Image: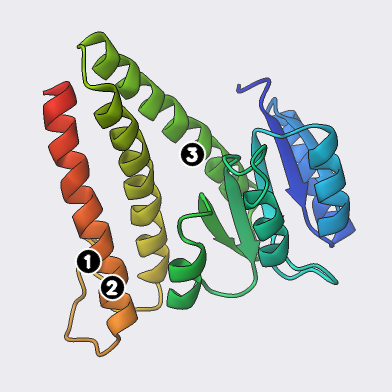
Amino acid sequence: MTTGLKVLYIDDEALLKMAFVETLKQQGYDARGAISGKEALELIDAEIPDIIILDVMMKPMDGWETLSHIKNNEATRHVPIIMQTGKSLTIKDVIKYGDQIEDYLIKPVRLPDLVKSVEGVRERKEMISREVDQATVKGGDSNLIVEYSNVRHRTLIGKRLITILGRIYPIRTDGTIETDFDMPELHEIINRFEEERKRCRELHKILLG
C-alpha cells in the first residue's frame, strides 16, 4: 500500500468528493478535498500536494481556469494534475492542455480507475527517476539527462492521451491514424507524439544503451 503522498481532490459535488477522498485515504494516501477552485488554491497555498485531481465542470471558477492558476505559479507548476469530467477529451483540449495534465478521467469515474490513475502518476515518476539515476551513474551528459527526463514524461503522457482520443477518433493502438481522416489538428498531435517518441528512443540509446 502506498503511503505518504499528499493528494488533493477538487470537485464541487460534495458527496463525490467525500467518497473519493475517503477511498484515497484507505489506499494510504494523505488525501484532502476541496469543493471549488478558490478553496483548492487556498489549500494549495497552505500546503503543496504531490498530486491534484481536478474536476473540469465547476462554478464560478472551472477546472481549466484553476489549472491555469496552478501552472502559472512557479511553486506549483510541476505538480501533476489529473483532470476529470463528464465530457470526452477533445483534440482542442489536448492541443491546449496536453502538456499541463497527467491524465484525463471521464465521469462517472469508478473508484478503482481513480486509484489506478493516481498510482500511474506515482509509477511514472518513480520509473523516470530510476532511469535518470542510471544515466547519471553511467556519466551521461547532464543536459541530455534533463532533456530525456522531460521527453520521456511527455511521451508517456502523450501515449495515454492518444489512447483516450482513440475512443472517439480513428486511431490505431500503435498511435497511427486508421484512415486519411481529414482533421489536420489530429495529425498534428500524432506527428508531435511520433517526433518525441523518436527523440526519446535516441536519448535512451545514448544515455542507457
Neighbor class of circle 1 (other Cα within 10 Å; few <14, some 14-19, many 20+) is: some
**In the rendered view, does 69 fall on the left or right side of 200?**
right
Q: Amino acid at mark 3?
A: Gly
Residue at the spot of label 3: 120
Residue at the location (28% across, 35% down)?
A: 148
Question: N-terminal of the two: label 1 or label 3?
Answer: 3
Select label 3 or label 2 by which is in front. Answer: 2
Establish if 143 lies above or below 87.
above
**Residue 53 image point, x, y percent:** 67, 49
**In the rendered view, does 196 fall on the left or right side of 44?**
left
**What SS does tag 1 mark?**
helix
Question: Marks 2 and 1: CB-CB under 8 Å?
Answer: yes
**Residue 64 image point, x, y percent:** 66, 65
Q: Amino acid at mark 2?
A: Glu
Residue at the location (80% across, 67% down)?
A: 61
Q: Is residue 159 visible?
A: yes
Gap between marks 2 and 1, in whole Å?
5 Å
Select label 1 or label 3 by which is in front. Answer: 1
Residue at the spot of label 1: 191
Q: Is residue 18 visible?
A: no
Residue at the spot of label 2: 188
Front residue of this view, candidates 166 and 190: 190
Front residue of this view, candidates 113 and 165: 165
**What SS does tag 3 mark?**
helix
Gap between marks 1 and 3, in whole Å?
25 Å
Q: Quadrant of the N terminus?
A: top right
Q: Amino acid at mark 1?
A: Asn
**Residue 47 image point, x, y percent:** 80, 32
Establish if 17 lies above or below 2.
below
